[in-house]
Amino acid sequence: MTSPTLADVVAVLDTWYPPSTAEDWDAPGTVCGDPTAPVRKVLLAVDVTAAVVDEALDWGADLLVAHHPLYLRPVHSVAGTTYKGALVHRLIRGGCALHAAHTNADAAAGGVADALATAIGLVDLVPLVPIDPTTGTGRIGRLPEPLTLEQFARQVAAAVPPTEHGVRVAGARDGRVRTVAVVGGSGDSLFDDVRAAGVDAYVTADLRHHPASELRERAAFEAGSSDDSVGTPYLVDVAHSASEWLWLPAAAQALETEMAERFGGTRLDTRVSTLRTDPWTFRLDSPPRPASVPATPATDPSGGRP
């Protein structure tokens, strides 16, 4: 049986995750690899790290499909004297191509946002910032039954891969959550869209202090309160890589099925890397403090909540 080539696999990926839907600043696509080379094994991962490259080469992968591009800015050299250049050289020597599907995979039907929304229990999904009815940045959905914010946050924590970051929450523990917006990866640039959607909670990653604090203060103000735990949207902040990893298993299975159909039953083996690429390795809880010293500053939008 004839094996698909790199060009064949990339053509399928570009159909599912059109490069034209990527953000202007993004750099998805093939970083290295011979388009005519056969592809029999594909490893999928969120990040291109040294450990992930080790895994790909040790397994004998012909292609590494990553969510995050290795290079987001133009470069003038891929010399092996730089850590990124060294990774590219190792992949080329090992006969393993590298391809990235980033914000084009975020926006796609069946992509990163859909996977995150489905995993945390949302139904009736529509794009948060639409390109068309099924494609666009983020997703809005609803829970089949309302939950308290604490119950919902625990549901999110159980759905995403574990990290030292865990899950941070801003809002009242007993707040009611029925409608939710999600964005995989860094999402505080979309706060205006989330507010316009009128959802009860927003699940994303990499929330910064000032944008998060201002959103919660505004929510309390509009609810007629000085208590920043009231008002919506509530915030549920997960680790960046954890919010995006959930897309990989479905993408791997779809790739196996598609290649078998196109190439007369030829088996394409896929593997999803389970290596933790979140950069944080441990976390310390704050030590007990005298009663006269507040354990959590009043301006922390999480309010000390888990």
Image (cartoon, grey):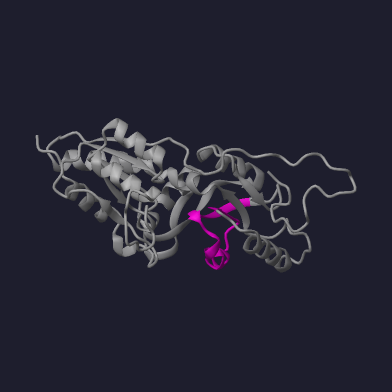
**For residue 275, side relative to residue 1 (left or right):** right
Q: What residue appears at the point 60 percent right and 50 percent down from the top-left corner?
A: 236
Q: What residue appears at the point 12 percent right and 37 percent down from the top-left corner?
A: 264
Q: Which residues are magenta?
A: 177-205
How far from the left and from the top, in percent, is residue 84?
37, 50
How far from the left and from the top, in percent, is residue 81?
36, 49
**For residue 229, side relative to residue 196 (left or right):** right
**For residue 69, side relative to residue 159 (left or right):** left
Q: What residue appears at the point 68 percent right and 67 percent down from the top-left corner?
A: 218
In which image quadrant can residue 51 be found? top left
Q: Could you say which is closer to the camera, residue 179 or residue 104?
A: 104
- Quadrant containing the C terminus is top right
Q: Is residue 223 magenta?
A: no
- Quadrant containing the N terminus is top left
Q: What residue appears at the point 74 percent right and 42 percent down from the top-left corner?
A: 286
Q: Residue furthest front?
A: 81
Residue 155 visible, this angle: yes
How far from the left and from the top, in percent, is residue 171?
69, 53
Vertical arrangement, residue 77 with respect to residue 265, above or below? below
Q: Residue furthest right?
A: 292
